[in-house]
Image (cartoon, grey):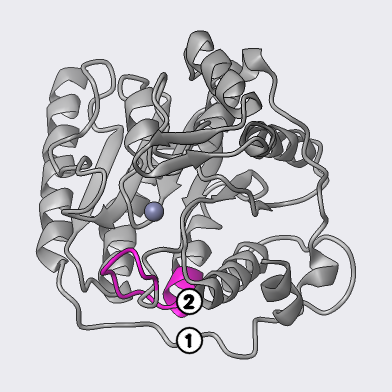
Amino acid sequence: MARGIEAAGLRDAVVELEPRAATSAEMARVHDPTYLAAVERFCEAGGGMVDPDTVASVDSWTAATHAAGAGLEAVEVLSEGRGDAAFLAVRPPGHHASASTARGFCLVNSAAVTAAALRAAGERVVIIDWDAHHGNGTQDLFWNDPGVLYVSAHEFPLFPHTGRLDETGGPDAPGTTCNIPVPAGTTGDVYLAAFDDVVEPLVERFAPDWTVVSAGFDAHRRDPLTGLALSSGDFAALAERVARWTPGRIVAFLEGGYDEQALVESTAVTVAALLSEQRVIGTGHVGGPAETEPPTTGGPGRDVVEATRRIHATIREESEKFDH
Ligand SMILES: [Zn+2]
C-alpha cells in the first residue's frame, strides 16, 4: 500500500496516523461483549482456526482492535478539519464479522464500529461496500437502523452466499440495505451504471453526514479468489463518485484483496481519486499514478442493476404513499 501511494506521487498529500486500539465499549456498540472477550482470550492463548476460513494468531487481537481504532481516530481527525478523507490500510478485514460471529478472515467489524460511533453521535452514515464478497456482518448489524444506508456490490453466488436483491432492510428501515449481486465476469462499466443509476440517487435521498467505504480490491480481474473483472481504473472511477457525497467526511477501510500488485495499484488510484475532489493536505505535487489500467467493459450484470433499480424504486413509491 505504501508502495502504491509512493508510486502515485501521493506521499506528500497523505498524513500518516498512528492508530489506537478501539476500547471494549466502542466495539460493544456492535459486538457481543462475551464474543469480544472470547476472541481476545483465544488470541492470547496462541490463536488457531476460528472457523475453516478464519485463522487468528497471538497478534490478531492487537491488529483487529487497532484496525477498528484507526477508524475512530480518522473520524476524530477529519472532524477537526485536519484532513479530507482517510484511507486505512488495515488488516484483518472486518465486514464478515457480525455481533457474535467471526467469519471469512474477520474478527472485529472495523467499518461497523466506526459507523456505530458516528450513529451514537447522531450522524447519518452511508456504507459503500465494493469488496467482491457480500458484507454479511455489516448488513446484519445495521439491518433495522434507518440511520445507516448499507450498499454492497458483490459477486453472487460466492461466499458468504448472502446479499440477495430482496434483502432491503428491516421493518424500521425499509430500503436502507441495497444489494447488487452481480455474476462472475462483471466489468467496471456495470459497476459504474449501478453507482450512477441506483446508488447515487439513493445516497442523495438518504442525505448522509458521513461515508464509510469497505474498500476491498478482490473484485480486480487478477484476484485469485473471485471471478469479477474490474481494473484499477474502475476502482478510481468508483472512488471519484464516492468522493462527491460527503466531502471531508470519508473513511475508507481496506477489506479483501489477494493479488499484491492489484492491491498496490488499486489502493493508489483510490487514494488519488478520494483526494482529487478534496483539499489536499500537505505540500507537493499530487498526480495520478503513471499507469492506471483502463476501465473495463462488456461483462454481464446489467440485468441485476436494472432489477436493483426497480426494487428500490418500488420501496420509495411505497414510502411516499405513506408520507402523503
Ligand atoms: Zn472479499
* Location of residue 121 by image quarter: top right
- Looking at the rendered structure, the secondary structure element under dot 1 is loop
Using the image, determine if residue 89 lies above or below residue 170: below
Residues drawn in magenta: 223-237
- Looking at the rendered structure, the secondary structure element under dot 2 is helix
* Location of residue 183 by image quarter: bottom left
- Name the residue rendered at 32%, 62% in the picture: 196
Locate residue 190 relative to residue 221 in the image: left or right.
left
Residue type at the position of mark 2: Ser
- Of 229 and 177, nearer the camera is 229
Residue 56 coordinates in the image, percent (x, y): 54, 38
- Of 207 and 298, nearer the camera is 298
What residue is shown with label 1? 293
Tell me the quadrant of the picture where the N terminus can be found. Answer: bottom right
* Location of residue 182 by image quarter: bottom left
Alpha carbon distance from label 2 to label 1: 6 Å
What residue is shown with label 2? 232
The answer to whether residue 270 is magenta is no
Magenta-drawn stretch, dominant element (helix, strand or loop)? loop
Answer with mark 2 or mark 1, whichever residue precedes in sequence: 2
Please say if the residues under marks 2 and 1 sit with CB atoms less than 8 Å apart: yes
Using the image, determine if residue 25 lies above or below residue 283: above
Mark identifier at residue 320: none
- Name the residue rendered at 9%, 63% in the picture: 303
Label 1 packing within 10 angstroms: few (<14), some (14-19), many (20+): some
Question: Is residue 242 visible in the rendered structure shown here?
Answer: yes
Name of the residue lying farthest toward the top? 34
Locate residue 52 relative to residue 267 in the image: left or right.
left
Residue type at the position of mark 1: Glu
- Name the residue rendered at 38%, 43% in the picture: 104
- Of 304 and 136, nearer the camera is 136
The answer to whether residue 228 is magenta is yes
